[in-house]
Image: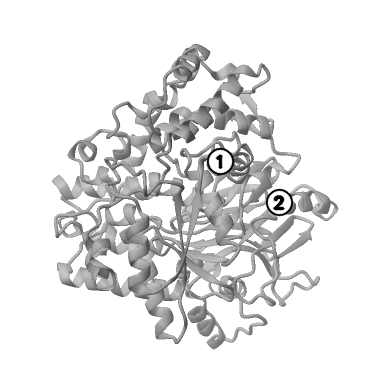
Amino acid sequence: MCGIVGWADFARDLTAERRVLQAMVDTMALRGPDEEGVWVRPRVALGHRRLSVIDLEGGKQPMVTPETLPDGTPLAAISYSGEVYNFTELRGELAARGHRFRTRSDTEVVLRAYLEWGPEFVRRLNGMFAFAIWDARGEELLLYRDRLGIKPLFYYPTRDGVLFGSEPKAVMAHPESRAVLSLDGLRDVLSFVRVPGQTPMKGLYEVRPGHVLRVRDGHRSEERYWALEARPHTDDVPTTVRVVRELLEDIVSRQMVADVPLCSLLSGGLDSSALTALAQRGLASRGGGRIRSFSVDFVGQVENFAPEPLREAPDAPFAAELVRHVGTDHRVILLDNADLASPRVRSTVMRAWDLPYGEGDLGPSLYLLFREVRKESTVALSGESADEVFGGYLWFHDRRAVQADTFPWHALGERPVAELSTAFLDPGLTAELNLPEYIADQYRTALAEVPHLAGETGEDRRMRIASHLNITRFMPMLLDRKDRLSMANGVEVRVPFCDHRLVEYVFNVPWSMKTYDGREKSLLRGAVADLLPRSVVERRKAPYPSTQDAGYDRAIRQELEKIVAEPSSPVLPLLDLDAVRRHLDTPVEKASSMLVRGLHHETPARLDTWLGSYGVTLDW
């Protein structure tokens, strides 16, 4: 896992621009704390920061081919981030075709595969990745991103080429880029929907999941190589459960390959418990010891826990029982309000994000969790995305949400997301944003992308829509959060539930099968029930833990008070100060929900930190 940066320009000689490239590379130091490299040619400059995971000595980057053009230029070069889990099989196939390897790294396999099969080779890869390949034969840059968008890849078109990087900060280190927040960018921030390819920054884009961006002679074209397809599902329930189990066993086995310490993230829920149990079982079968596992909790959470609509009980007892059941080497990371509300931590989280996203205390708690994980492990398995794939969220099981003419996660709250997220904004700005219409327009666009079987109607049609919306518009928010906050600590997080084979298979299972036992995530529960204690198997879905201590909300209000009181706060022109003051005068009785914190209490503080830290120009 690494950070990549680069620059292609077809109208100047980049060999004189090494200093600029180095500045871009330097921004990726946290993503790649182990090593760095640059490779510069007249039309392209590639940079790399490395987090060593496989072939610690041989996987240096950027990597070039030993084969060259007549003038000595390598045929191709690559700057690569991610993991290809089937690289061993691909290496064997390539070796049989005459390729010779100098390293044990998956990076070299990817480069050789491109030479052998051309641009379509990406369809053969199983993994999470974002990489740039420069093909000197046609002077073409290709930017690839994995099918589900697990790994990030941003780009910024220039007059004669393109800038790119794993994070916005890499692109913004280039003097030709500008940090500008437009109305559309602010709509993106506030809508709680991730639009593929779009960012809040004007002129800054992401390579969309399952796409490759090709840049040649200053011209760009983005091509899709993968998308979810609607296919008939012919397996019965027992067969479907068996296939899910077989896929999970293969996926976890592949994703445990690493030359550095590996762990699992364990909440005590079904998803993380399933992965932890499978990982421990696989390790034991190979004569290994106990896998490390980590969970996060909050001071006083167990003793003072109060049941909530989405969480009936605290996580800690379930995680402890899973640890006893499978025998992991477990550690609890205990956080308090001083940690979560620390301005230093919150500023670090914003710097990791680069963009004004976030949901309440989840950002700080994840960042602090990974900071502790890094002391003992470099790679972590995470249960992220099981809810999107198997249908675990509450809105999958609420008829109002499923039938609503909007994104399902927008349909359950007492107040519309558009109202929550603009509660403190200036009324004139709120009217100009017209967030309800923006969300409705994005919903219509997303709806048009959903594939259907011929004649598909009723529940099957609605639930296919819900699944597709969650995978393409909700899941990216969680994957981005996990990537930024883990990589800010030099931790590689692997997400087995995002293996495209599993996603494709489960996407096409009828909803009646996905809920065959009358509960959420029936297929997953049935596939791993024999590995888990009954308490975990029977536990209801609960979200990532969030503190219930009202002291956290009070701390955030104090930050908001400082913003309102400081005349130089960059966010002041955007705010309705009377609405803010009314809110500050309202007593805090208990910690508010994650959604309310993320889109209401913390939005002004988040924007203020971001605008102030990055010198963002407001364009409206």
Where is residue 361 shown, x and y percent of the image? 48, 41
Dots 1, 2 in contact, CB < 8 A: no
Residue situated in front as seen by the camera: 4 or 527: 527
The nearer-to-camera label among 1 and 2 is 1
Image point (59%, 48%), residue name: 154
Where is residue 112 shown, x and y percent of the image? 60, 75
Residue situated in front as seen by the camera: 120 or 481: 481
Q: Which amino acid does label 2 sit on?
A: Trp
Residue situated in front as seen by the camera: 588 or 508: 588
The label on residue 210 is none
The label on residue 338 is 1
The reply, left or right, for residue 453 in relation to residue 429 is left
What is the crowding at mark 1: few (fewer than 14 residues within 10 Å), some, or many (at least 20)? Answer: few
- As drawn, the residue found furthest toward the right would be 16
What is the crowding at mark 2: few (fewer than 14 residues within 10 Å), some, or many (at least 20)? Answer: many
Q: What residue type is labelled 1?
A: Ala
Where is residue 412 shown, x and y percent of the image? 27, 35
Question: Looking at the image, can residue 325 be seen?
Answer: yes
For the N terminus, give its image quadrant: bottom right
The reply, left or right, for residue 85 in relation to residue 529 is right
Image point (40%, 32%), residue name: 596
The reply, left or right, for residue 302 in relation to residue 66 is left
Residue placed under numbered mark 2 in the picture:
7
Label whose residue precedes the other's in the sequence (1 or 2): 2
Color style of the picture: one colour
SS at mark 2 in the image: strand
- Tell me if residue 404 comes above or below residue 381 in the rendering: above
Question: Looking at the image, can residue 208 be seen?
Answer: no
Where is residue 407 shown, x and y percent of the image? 32, 37
Between the C-alphas of marks 1 and 2, the distance is 41 Å
